[in-house]
């Protein structure tokens, strides 16, 4: 014979699962947490060098897998400079609007050696709007 507590626990778990699924289905794009873009820096590249995100707040994580200090800035976006020591991770959050942006390492000579990339920012689709 099964314990009444096991039945009650299973029923409560089922109710909580249904509630969580229903809440997730009701979330609109505007309520989503910010997007995260991971960029891996090393001598002398940034990967991915071409990427896409949806418009809005984007948290950029710069993971330095190299042996020297690097930084990241987004062309035309004041205040988006972030420095990162070897083996460390740094982050910056930017609100990106639809368009294409160039990001690069502003350390002397790094951009010219290939530490450059671009991100294409797309507008939210009709189905994603709240």
Image (tube, rainbow, N blue to C red):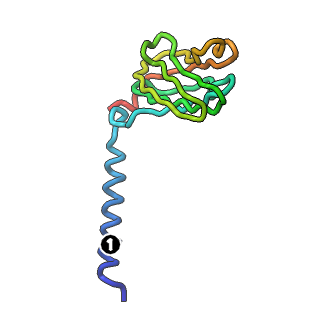
Pointer 1: residues within 10 angstroms few (<14), some, or many (20+)? few
Horizontal and vertical percent position of residue 35? 44, 33
Is residue 100 positioned above or below 29 on the image?
Answer: above
Is 72 placed left or right of 17 in the picture?
Answer: right
- Quarter of the image that includes the N terminus: bottom left
Q: Decide which of 73, 84 is in the foreground and name it.
A: 84
Q: Decide which of 57, 54 is in the foreground and name it.
A: 57
Q: Decide which of 51, 40 is in the foreground and name it.
A: 40
**Residue at x 34%, y 58% (from the top left corner):** 18
Which element type, helix, strand or loop, lies under badge 1?
helix
Q: Decide which of 82, 25 is in the foreground and name it.
A: 82
Horizontal and vertical percent position of residue 21? 36, 52
Is 54 placed left or right of 39 in the picture?
Answer: left
**Residue at x 31%, y 55% (from the top left corner):** 19
Rendered image quadrant of residue 112: top right
Is 22 placed left or right of 108 in the picture?
Answer: left
Is residue 89 positioned above or below 99 on the image?
Answer: below
Is 129 placed left or right of 62 in the picture?
Answer: left
- Quarter of the image that includes the C terminus: top left
Q: Mark 1 points at which residue?
A: 9
Rendered image quadrant of residue 4: bottom left
Horizontal and vertical percent position of residue 67? 66, 30
**Residue at x 50%, y 27% (from the top left corner):** 53
Horizontal and vertical percent position of residue 105? 59, 18
């Amino acid at each position: 014979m099964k314990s009444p507590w096991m039945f009650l626990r299973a029923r409560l778990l089922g109710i909580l699962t249904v509630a969580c699924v229903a809440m997730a289905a009701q979330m609109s794009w505007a309520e989503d947490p910010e997007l995260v873009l991971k960029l891996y820096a090393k001598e002398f590249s940034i990967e991915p060098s071409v990427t896409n995100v949806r418009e809005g707040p984007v948290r950029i994580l710069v993971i330095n897998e190299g042996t020297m200090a690097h930084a990241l800035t987004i062309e035309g976006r004041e205040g988006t400079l972030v420095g990162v020591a070897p083996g460390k991770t740094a982050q910056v959050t930017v609100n990106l609007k639809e368009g294409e942006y160039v990001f690069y390492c502003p350390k002397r000579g790094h951009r010219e050696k290939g530490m450059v990339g671009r991100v294409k920012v797309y507008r939210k689709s009709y189905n994603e709007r709240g």
